Image (cartoon, grey):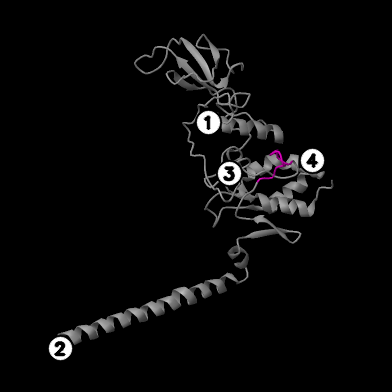
Amino acid sequence: MPAFSMRKTTWIRQHAAALRALLVLTVITGIIYPVAVFAVAQLPGLHDKAEGSLLRQDGRIVGSALIGQSFTDGNGAALARYFQSRPSSSGPGDGYDPTSTSFTNLGPESIVDTLADDPDDAKQSLLTQVCARSKAVGERDGVDGRRPFCTESGVGAVLSVIGPRDAKGAVPVPDRVVSVNESCPATPFLETYEGVRVECAKVGEDYSAGLIVPVRGAAPAGPAVPADAVVTSASGLDPDISPEYAGIQVSRVAKARNISDADVRAVVHAHTRGRDLGFLGEPRVNVLELNLELDRRYPVRN
């Protein structure tokens, strides 16, 4: 057989085999596998999860058990009759925009605010965000909202100590001390530091040359407001809160719904899930499921 004919025959066999493989794999991965997955997803116990774990009230979809949402009025104020979710940085306003999942990218070294006359140009540090949220939660739920390194006004208690430094980088004799997160004409949270009067911060003035000193203050070591009430999750869409955060909200919700604290605690307990497999993750409470159950059992009469 001529060499050309042999090469042609080999080429045809190879391409025919490739075409058969393509057709077989297309049937398996493009038809059989999707149909099998769809069929499995229809099994009892899996169908709701496959459909997005959607939750309904009065026959209409109100959300997903997998995506958190805020429970506020048109002005962004927390609705007293509802348990509140953790803070969210996804989207503007109250956050919890599922089309804009994000995180703040701020770490523990973010303790100095960017002050500005225009609020749009100002930027709060992570510390001030935590302080402000803790203060707000404390006032809303009737608990001690104080935290270490926070002022009573709800900003980071941070000083810029300006003056000559010694060999260790300390400033033994300050020339000036400025409360960098309290803009003038605010009264600084401390009157004096190392014998020097503490000044308020002037917008536009740079205090980075000073030694940045966070001041712990007299807040208790264990804050009454738990961490998940004051920091966002990585996704910004966390549907759960800790049992501790749910616990400090019980009295407010009970009062708003005109029921007893025990009634609310029973619903919270019913919607508290433990660690997965007994050791993965942390105990948690799904906020949307909890609020829907409260609406079903104890609706608020306007």
Residue drawn at the location 53% of the way across and 33% of the way down: 126
Percent coordinates x, y for residue 167 in the rendering: 34, 16
Query: Given the current orientation, which residue lies at the most extreme left position?
Result: 2
- The residue indicated by pointer 4 is 255
The label shown at residue 91 is: 3
Q: Nearer the viewer, residue 252 or 114?
A: 114
Residue drawn at the location 66% of the way across and 49% of the way down: 287
Q: Mark 1 touching mark 3, by CB under 8 A? A: no
Q: Quadrant of the N terminus?
A: bottom left
Q: Mark 4 touching mark 2, by CB under 8 A? A: no
- The residue indicated by pointer 2 is 2
Q: CA distance from mark 4 to mark 2?
A: 96 Å
Q: CA distance from mark 3 to mark 2?
A: 71 Å
Q: Mark 4 touching mark 3, by CB under 8 A? A: no
Q: CA distance from mark 4 to mark 1?
A: 34 Å
The answer to which of marks 4 and 2 sits earlier in the sequence is 2
Which amino acid does the dot numbered 3 rest on?
Answer: Gly
Residue 76 included in the magenta stretch of the image: yes
Percent coordinates x, y for residue 152 in the rendering: 63, 23
Which amino acid does the dot numbered 1 rest on?
Answer: Ser
Percent coordinates x, y for residue 16 in the rendering: 32, 83
Q: Mark 2 touching mark 1, by CB under 8 A? A: no
Task: Name above or below for residue 212 compared with residue 301.
Answer: above
